[in-house]
Image (cartoon, grey):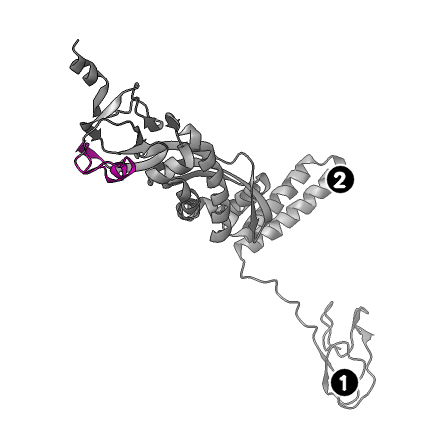
Amino acid sequence: MGILDKIKGQLIDVIEWTDSSSKTMVHKYNMNGKEIMMGAQLTVRESQVAIFVNEGEIADVFQPGRYELSTSNMPILTALKSWKYGFNSPFKSDVYFVNTKQFLDMKWGTSNPVMMRDAEFGMIRLRAFGIYSFKVFDPVAFLKEVFGTAELFTVDGVEGQIKRTIVSGLSDAIAESKIPALDLAANYEELSTYATNAINPKIASLGLTLCSFVIENISLPEEVEKSMDKRTSMGVLGNLDQYAKYQAAEAMRDAANNGNGMAGMGVGMGAGAAMGQMFAQSMNPGQQSAPAAPAAGGVCSACGAKISAGAKFCPECGAKQATETFCTNCGKPIPAGTKFCPECGAKQ
């Protein structure tokens, strides 16, 4: 091997990276102790960004495309190296490929219940879970704030941070939305929008952004779920008055069937009478019990003026009235002023 071949063997003329995993966020290009030659070909694929770092300082950033490295397309590195225009020389620099694609199907969930103040149930505890997706939208900020100089960085490094931020943002979203606990299940999409707007500002400083946030389920406390079931049942039943009468009739029937001896017979008779009255009322809800007919009146024994039945004094002359007398034919007691005996029909 000639000296020229040996020198070429120490230079890098093609720089590129293909992602073989689904979780790699940052990959440091392996130089193997070599230097980058001027005129080397740099290939940055879609959903990638290449960052050149010189002695720990961020230099040039390359978006997707194919580049021939020269001082003209590396202005920051040219300035850092104090190169004069057109100076071609091998150089050393760290090259990081940042994956800017979406990382999908990331799961989140509340490890502890989230407190919520509800207008109807007061303070309640909620549990929730779902999925989200995110990506790197600012590779330079991500390099500075998160992965630093690591040779390999995966989603595991930020997953915990994002999950905790999501739980905190969801709590804020539920509080700000003021959606009643009973209506949460019907407003998952609205809550997702609230949560995304609350979470993104918190992770923007890390160079990250949520692309989607999905709530799959929010679990309410057992007592709240029972209340919801009762309200659902009430809605299905419709006319609660009719249902209450039916339930009362069923209870009476069961009590009659379960009774023993004379007590059971008494309960059964009472239940039967009550059931008959209840069903009669249910069949004719508009019909009311007929009021008792007023007692027939009479005439004053002194002046002959009409007076109400049972009156002790005449409203016209003030004469005292006999409240009761006897039939002249059968001797049965009859109201005073009666013209015919209600028992035998004899004229008085």
- Residue drawn at (47%, 48%), measured in percent from left and top? 173
Q: Position of residue 244 (x, y in %)?
A: 58, 49
Depth order, front residue of 120/235: 120
Q: Is residue 298 left or right of residue 241?
A: right
Q: Quadrant of the C terminus?
A: bottom right
Q: Does residue 5 lie above or below 258 as drawn?
A: above
Write down the region rendered in magenta.
64-86
Name the amino acid type tagged 1. Cys
> How far is disc 2 from disc 1 in space, using C-alphas?
53 Å
Q: Position of residue 63 (x, y in %)?
A: 24, 37
Report which quarter residue 80 is drawn in: top left
Q: Position of residue 342 (x, y in %)?
A: 72, 69
Residue 183 visible, this angle:
no
Name the amino acid type tagged 2. Ala
Report which quarter residue 157 is drawn in: top left
Q: Kindly report which numbered mark, 2 or 1, lies closer to the viewer in this rendering.
A: 2
Depth order, front residue of 313/147: 147
Q: Residue furthest top?
A: 1
Tally of marks: 2
Report which quarter residue 50 is drawn in: top left
Q: Is residue 290 magenta?
A: no
Q: Does residue 334 lie above or below 319 as drawn?
A: above
Label 2 crowd bin: few (<14), some (14–19), many (20+), radius 10 Å? few
Depth order, front residue of 302/117: 117
Q: Which residue is mark 2?
A: 263
In the drawing, what numbered circle is on residue 300?
Answer: 1
Q: Is residue 78 magenta?
A: yes
Q: Is residue 89 left or right of residue 225?
A: left
Task: Assign a secondary structure to mark 2.
Answer: helix
Depth order, front residue of 201/345: 201
